[in-house]
Image (cartoon, rainbow, N blue to C red):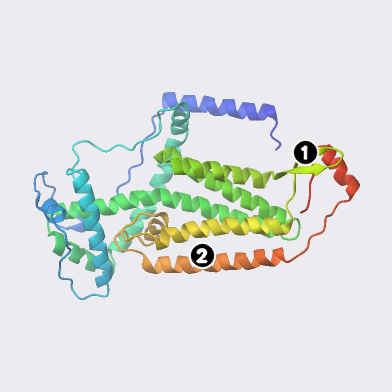
Amino acid sequence: MKLTRDKVISLAVAAMVGCWLLTYFVKPRPAQLEFVTPQQQLPNYTAQYPGDTKLIDRIVKSYELAMILVQTPYIQKNFTALESIRRWAREEFAERPDFLHPAVLELPEHNRDTVFGAVGYNMFAGVQAVAQEQIGHVLRWRIATFHDTYAYRTFRTAYFDLFGWDAEAAVLLARYQNDRAKIAVDVLLWSLTWTTAVIAAAVYLFKRRKSDFFGAVQKVTASTWLLMALAYLMQSWDKEQASSVISLIVSTLISVYLFVPVAIISHEEVGRKLARIRFAPNWTSLAAWLTISFLAVQILTWIRHSLPGATDPMTMLMQSFSGNFVHDPNHGKRLITTITAIVWGLAGVWAWRQQSKTYEPDFDAEIDLNKLDAGTFERIR
């Protein structure tokens, strides 16, 4: 279906009417995301009124991690996990001493202070909440499965031996896993988006492998930058970071240029003219390889420059698959690092082979001049 000006206007009007109706009649409800309860950590758990500061004193006033661990295959993993929890708890207690039992319920913050923020919130908050709840069901299942493993039972024993077999320690452990799982929800949503995009791109390239394959590669590369621009838009909208805004602008410009590449063409009869160009396969392959390189650098930076207990997207993604939000996924990180290196190397070899080939123009000079006069000059190289 071809989009005409009237259809675009009609869609815009319908979207605004729908947004107004949602704003007037519907109040978006935040997703109910609770993955772990204290009862799951301590069978004889009974809720206590705040006031016991023993756990706070043990954590805030501790400077070294001293404990006795039972001999298990997970000693080093448990030691690292316990240190991560202790560091996280010290920061939380130092910032908010009542964070385990807040006097006021914590409400999610949304960008609703601008006309565009209000429109986006009313149109997409409900859909986002539904998607988050569906992802939450999967995460609860994975966490419950991990809690039945020997690895978690050994960690749980070491944890309570260190922090005490009491209700406050159970609340702390449940809160730690809940906070990390909530971060993982959005990571999983974006992972599904990227996985869908990769599958769609692979199918599209396979279908076009014998007809204008490099044109398809160019469109896929441009779409990749467009998807990154969307991700940076959501990030800047949510966190209001200047770096996200800059990344959004740069990604959008790259995407637009790859979709509609232009250059200043000089000709003796018409002078200088801004005209649309067509990339040769060697330039298209180079753009694709550079895009893969940027993505590979980002993935490796997340993996190789994160400390145990970090909440970078790769760590959250791998912990979501296993349901293990206490141990650092070292084996998974090594696997992803190897796969990333192999993909980057294969893409580099493919791009290098295209650089060694010579591509001849497929049009004559008379047609070129006519296109140039019309302002739509295309060139192969």
- At horizontal 77% and vertical 38% (from top left) the residue drawn is 273
Q: Nearer the viewer, residue 177 or 298?
A: 298
Residue displayed at 17% across by 62% down: 64
Between disc 2 and disc 1, the foreground one is 1
Q: Position of residue 13 (x, y in %)?
A: 58, 25
Instruction: Indicate which disc residue 273 carries.
Output: 1
Of callouts 2 and 1, the N-terminal one: 1
How many neighbours does mark 2 have within 10 angstroms: few (below 14), some (14-19), or many (20 or more)?
some
Image coordinates for residue 371, horizontal then vertical, percent: 84, 41
SS class, disc 2: helix
Residue 7 in view of the camera: yes
In this picture, is 351 found above or below 126?
below
Give the tally of numbered discs.
2
* CA–CA distance in space, label 2 to label 1: 42 Å
Circle 1 sits in a helix, a strand or a loop, which is it?
strand
Name of the residue lying farthest toward the right:
366
Quarter of the image that includes the N terminus: top right
Q: Amino acid at mark 2?
A: Thr
Across and down, in percent, residue 233 comes to 49, 41
Position of residue 90 in the picture relative to residue 110 (left or right): left
In the drawing, what numbered circle is on residue 340? 2
Residue 83 quadrant: bottom left
On screen, 115 above or below 107? above
Is residue 37 visible in this depiction of the protein?
no
Q: Nearer the viewer, residue 266 or 101?
A: 266
- Where residue 68 sits in the image (x, y, percent)? 15, 70
Is residue 128 found left or right of 223 in the rendered image? Answer: left
Mark 1 neighbour density, 10 Å: few (under 14) some (14–19) many (20 or more): some
> If the image is split into quadrants, where does the C terminus sit?
bottom right
Going 43% across and 44% down the picture, which residue do you hit?
A: 131
C-beta proximity under 8 Å, tags 2 and 1: no
Kind of residue at badge 1: Lys
